Amino acid sequence: MQHPHALFPRLFPKTSRTFYGKRWLNIFLRTMHLIGIAGVGAAFLYQAASEFWLPYMILTLISGAMMVVVEIWSNGIWLIQIRGLATILKLMILSLTFWFGLKASIIILVIIISGIISHAPAKIRYYPFD
């Protein structure tokens, strides 16, 4: 079994890892994520049956998870930066739907956090809490 400290350099490399096409993959994943969110939002607003919104929810979850994996693989520092912490916070807020149901206030709060963080200056998005 590997020593726990051996994982640290793999999760937090000195220089971020990248690969050819990473930017285009991120653009594609963000676009798919937005399509999924739009579909779920529309279904929520118009109270559509689950068979109409479930494919959009799956698209949202898969594209979001893939974006997180790419970010953590590139450099685990994402986990302690504002942008990563905001994603974790959004997931925690969304988990409230298990207890309170899907409420407009929960969705709107997640959208507000997303909008603010994604359009904040880099010095805010990339600020690490360490």
Image (cartoon, rainbow, N blue to C red):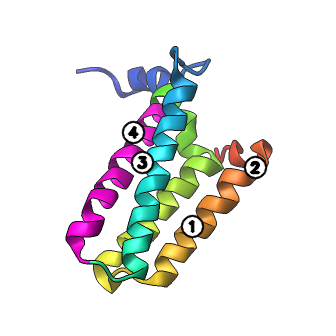
Q: Position of residue 119 (x, y in %)?
A: 72, 53
* Residues packed near mark 3 inside 10 Å, few (<14), some (14 to 19) or many (20 plus): some
**Which residue is denoted by mark 2 in the rendering?**
124
The numbered mark at residue 111 is 1
Q: Position of residue 2 (x, y in %)?
A: 29, 20
Marked residue nearer the N-terminal end (1 or 4):
4
Marked residue nearer the N-terminal end (4 or 2):
4
* Residue 104 located within the stretch drawn in magenta: no
Name the secondary structure under disc 2.
Answer: helix
The numbered mark at residue 57 is none
Q: Which residues are magenta?
A: 49-72
**Which residue is denoted by mark 4 in the rendering?**
66
* Residue 53 located within the stretch drawn in magenta: yes
Name the secondary structure under disc 3.
Answer: helix
Q: Is residue 112 visible?
A: yes
Which picture quadrant has residue 10?
top left
Q: Is residue 85 left or right of residue 1?
A: right
3 lies above or below 99: above
Q: How many marks?
A: 4
Looking at the image, do the residues carrying marks 3 and 2 touch, with CB atoms under 8 Å apart? Answer: no
Amino acid type assigned to the residue bearing label 2 in the image: Ile
Marked residue nearer the N-terminal end (1 or 2):
1
Gap between marks 4 and 2, in whole Å?
A: 23 Å
Q: Position of residue 50 (x, y in %)?
A: 23, 72
Q: Is residue 28 left or right of residue 97?
A: right
Amino acid type assigned to the residue bearing label 1 in the image: Ile
Magenta stretch: dominant SS?
A: helix
Looking at the image, do the residues carrying marks 1 and 2 touch, with CB atoms under 8 Å apart? Answer: no
Gap between marks 3 and 1, in whole Å?
A: 14 Å
Could you tell me which quadrant the N terminus lies in? top left
Marked residue nearer the N-terminal end (3 or 1):
3
The numbered mark at residue 64 is 3
